[in-house]
Image: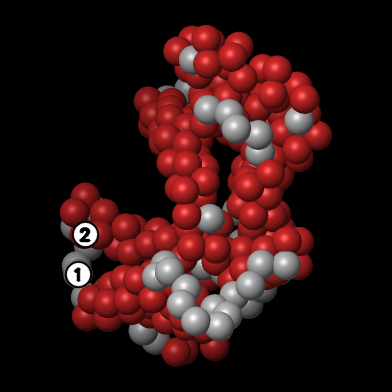
Amino acid sequence: MTISTIRWLLPLIILYAVARPTIRRDWPLMRQHWAIMLWLGLTGGLLFSALQYVGLQYTTALNTSILNSLVPVLIIAAGALIFRDRVHLGHVLGISVSLGGVLVIITRAELAVLLQLSFNYGDIIIFVNMAIFAVYAVCLRLQPSIHWSSLLVVLAVVSSVGTLPFAVLEATSGQTFDLTPSTVAAALYVSIFPGLLAFAAWNRGVELIGAGRAGPFLHLVPLFTAVLGTLFLGERLMLFHVAGLVLILGGVWLATRPASGPR
């Protein structure tokens, strides 16, 4: 909860410092549509970030990677259930192909890895969290016409206020982290990159192409992980990385093509 609070509190400070005129301009619209703004803040900010960190305490990185890769599927399901979105065959095929590429990379193309998976309540938390993010993604279409920085301020305020009491509880119970250079660097990274820049890019991308077409791009995460591991950690680029790359890029291309014909 402490890292979740920091993740949103620092972006809030940055945004308030650089985007006050924009926030003041958008305030009447945000106040008018307070219910949807609160809903987006709860789903995309407070619950998503907090449950992700909680779930990671009780499950493995492999399980989390597999469950995270279900988000594009959950986005389609959420759109169909909430807004009666129509789904075309190419979209489903593309997500299926890119999901196959994800599984190839994270299991190293070994079927035994999948067969040996075991799940616990931490996985349930992660799965529920992915479903919450899918709901947030499809509900972004309901936001008023405001600047991306104004939306992020709402997410940051709701998340910071919601998690701060639990962060205080953690600290008073002795669950604190040492202020070492590595922990400070980690806190700054999750605040600026996933917390601020990635959310801004995601929200804008969904605004431009819709949640359904944006979802398959999440399958690029394990691909980027493999590339960064090769560049910075000295990991070897293996054949299964290449196979996963081809499947993921091909699937994303199929899933993001404009629909044609009957859906």
Which residue corresponds to the image point at 49% horizontal and 15% vertical from the top-left? 19
For residue 190, say whether it is visible.
no
- Outermost residue on the front side: it is 261
Q: Position of residue 188 (x, y in %)?
A: 43, 28
Q: Position of residue 119 (x, y in %)?
A: 66, 73
- Is the residue under label 1 in contact with that under label 2 (CB below 8 Å)? yes
> In this image, 247 relative to 169: left or right?
left
* The N terminus: image quadrant: top right
Decide: is 194 above or below 74: above
Pointer 2 residue: 230
Q: Quadrant of residue 125?
A: bottom right
> In this image, 165 relative to 2: left or right?
right
Which residue is at the front of the view, 31 or 185?
Answer: 31
Residue 237 numbered tag = 1
Q: Secondary structure at mark 1?
A: loop
Which residue corresponds to the image point at 27% horizontal and 77% vertical from the top-left? 246
For residue 69, say whether it is visible.
yes
Which residue is at the front of the view, 185 or 75?
Answer: 75
Question: For the residue carrying disc 2, how many other residues have a C-alpha within 10 Å: few (<14), some (14-19), or many (20+)?
Answer: some
